[in-house]
Amino acid sequence: MLLPQLRGGVRALSTTTRRQLSFFGDTPPPQSRVLNQVPALENFAAFESDPILQSCVSFYGADFGTEQISYVGKLAGSQHVAELARDANENIPVFHSHDRFGNRIDFVKYHPAYHEIMKLGIEAEIPSYSWRNADKRGSAVARSALGYLMYQAESGTQCPQTMTYACVPALKHMTDEQRSVCDFLTKAITPEYDPRNVPATEKNGITIGMSMTEKQGGSDVRANITTAKPVDANKTGPGSAYFLNGHKWFTSAPMCDAFLTLAQTENGLSCFIVPRWVPSTGERNEGLRFQRLKSKVGDRSNASSEVEYHNAYAELLGPEGRGIAIILEMVQNTRLDCLVGTAGLMKRALFEAVNHTSHRSAFGSVLLDTPLMRAVVADLTIESEAATALAFRIASTFDAQASEYDKALGRIATAIAKYHICKRAPQFVYEAMESLGGNGYVDEGPMGRLYRQAPLNAIWEGSGNVICLDVLRCFHREPDAVEALMHELSSLGHVEEYGRKFNKLKAEIENIGQNQGRLRNIVGTAALLLQAVALSRTSTEAVVDAFLKTRLSGSPTRLEYGALEPGCDVDAIITRSNTIVKPEAASTTHAWNPLQQSTRRLHTSAHRCHASATTTTTTTASSPTHPRNLPFSTADEVMERRAAGDWDCPTCGRLNFVYATKCLCGHARASEEHTRDGDWQCGFCGDKVFSYKRFCRCGEPNPDLL
């Protein structure tokens, strides 16, 4: 007998009837009911949920990219991309050396989910944004924000996108003749993904890989034994064709359209581009032979191969013997993405921990309401914000519009930040995993994938000791970089806890060459101080105060989370991470679409400065309202004023102000980028009483204030 079709379904039946029908499965028995389980963290706006990222984007002048950044954040937080990420990592790439007829094909097959994520990322300009917007201040920060967000969703696909981005400086060494045959440079920065196994000449957009390390050398590429001989002995030099013979031990993303590699010529180690298809003939580069794929701990969606060169066709980039010099800038770019991606990974782990602990109950309380869990989440928040703040300070030094000071700082601080942030990630992700209990250790969720990924960036592009030796080299050979670093670190020297650590670091640096065994301590301490400075510009007083109390006392290798010092404002800190925003609640102005790039809204002069928004201020250095004594509220104030439309320059429409200071005795001094920089003591009268006013970086003063 069929059951009657009732408007209300089973719930419309009486309680007695429902019990009688329970054997049909309409009402689950008590033991099958799901209670106190946490909803998946999906369909949220990752950018709007990340206050420190928003602050960094604004502070470093990348506001013009907010729509695009928000779009990528919503992609990264979507259920659709989460499912793609699971599929791409559960269905790992498969290598096919030959076809069914015995012909060598050297082909790696990926799951369609991998290709879809690649398409989303490349069309969102993750590999190309800063190159395509090099004329805009903040373009490097905006591009880093795109990668930071997408790395949270799926990290394996970021490897070929990072390499494509990083290879651009090397591709600029291509000759006009090379580019006339196949313009790898233009194609590398074209936001179009084409996964077809065809020559690059038939594509609009391509990806570029790197193939550097060998079995016997690893990070020591000077030990490479792969050789290069010119195809025509009478034609050598930049742009000429060579045959390579040798091997490479790690070649990730083997379906890239071409690879940058190093090989020995008669004049020393040189840089070559090795296309998978010979541009001039359209034939497969048969001398490029993949041997197998690595079975890696993590990063499973991304294939990493071993390769041999058997008279592989290659073209020389730059002069012979200049290979190391050409790849150095590439290494800097990939190190930037290592630390930015790791900061994003840590943020996603924190999101997962907050999502779980704010929904899960135990022993009569929501986990996030218990003192112990609040201490852990607050400590993780401090660590995450410190990583993000420093990552984007480093990213700002990569701007094409960056000052010489910033560029010098970036040459040494990139390695320092990469060392520290990437080393902190595994313990951080473990602690976040522990917050989820047993559910965190189950691979059906994302925590296992995050945990396996966490160690990678500390190894890639120079493991810890290699990075420390690079920093030592900078101390010996780049005095301008060292000077910039010390100037950057001196900006918080007046803070007691910070000042003690800084003075100790200076003493160690003076003898840095005499005790290399202390290099890790020196680099780790420098990273902590850089994080404190970066936080003071972009985070809140509660976070910075807690960072100073918990990170600057004791060893820079402190690993325990949740052991906060008394006086830390746990409630204020947690509000920084317990801010998950749904897409529908995000600003409707963040509506960038890669299919409608021509209608992208740039930041214009629609906003205007308001006289009521600020006043000329006269303070003393000892006053609690002195800018030096308010280093932590600046970012919040800027964000609030920006939301109201205040402080935007009426000429260029951007919030890029600087301060000009003037002592009350009438003696003026040069503009300062930040109110906390400099000593603030008048060079004329020696007093510390001054007034300050705001100017836009474009040179336009606020007429209401001057």
Image (spheres, rainbow, N blue to C red):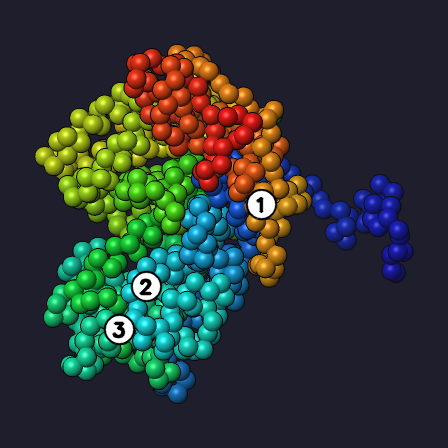
- The front one of 6 and 394 is 394
Q: Amino acid at mark 1?
A: Thr
Residue at the image point whose x is 20% and y is 67% from the top: 319
Whether label 2 touches label 3, CB < 8 Å: no
Q: Is residue 467 above or below residue 431?
A: below
Residue at the image point whose x is 49% and y is 67% from the top: 193
Residue 478 visible from this viewpoint: yes
Picture quadrant where residue 162 is located: bottom left
Q: CA distance from mark 2 to mark 1?
A: 32 Å
Total labels drawn: 3
Q: Amino acid at mark 3?
A: Gly
Q: Secondary structure at mark 3?
A: loop
Residue 579 visible from this viewpoint: no
As drawn, the label of residue 604 is 1
- The front one of 88 and 391 is 391
Q: CA distance from mark 1 to mark 3?
A: 43 Å
> Counting other residues with Cα less than 10 Å from the Cα at mark 3, is it few (<14), some (14-19), or many (20 or more)?
many
> Counting other residues with Cα less than 10 Å from the Cα at mark 2, is it few (<14), some (14-19), or many (20 or more)?
some
Q: Secondary structure at mark 1?
A: loop
Q: Earlier in the sequence, mark 2 or mark 3?
A: 2
Q: Earlier in the sequence, mark 2 or mark 1?
A: 2
Residue at the image point whose x is 27% and y is 35% from the top: 485
Residue at the image point whose x is 71% and y is 44% from the top: 29
Q: Pointer 2: what residue?
A: 172
Locate residue 75, reporting x and y percent. Answer: 56, 52
User: Is residue 553 toward the left or the right of residue 39 in the image?
Assistant: left
Picture quadrant where residue 692 is located: top left
Q: Earlier in the sequence, mark 1 or mark 3?
A: 3
As drawn, the label of residue 239 is 3
Q: Nearer the viewer, mark 2 or mark 1?
A: 1
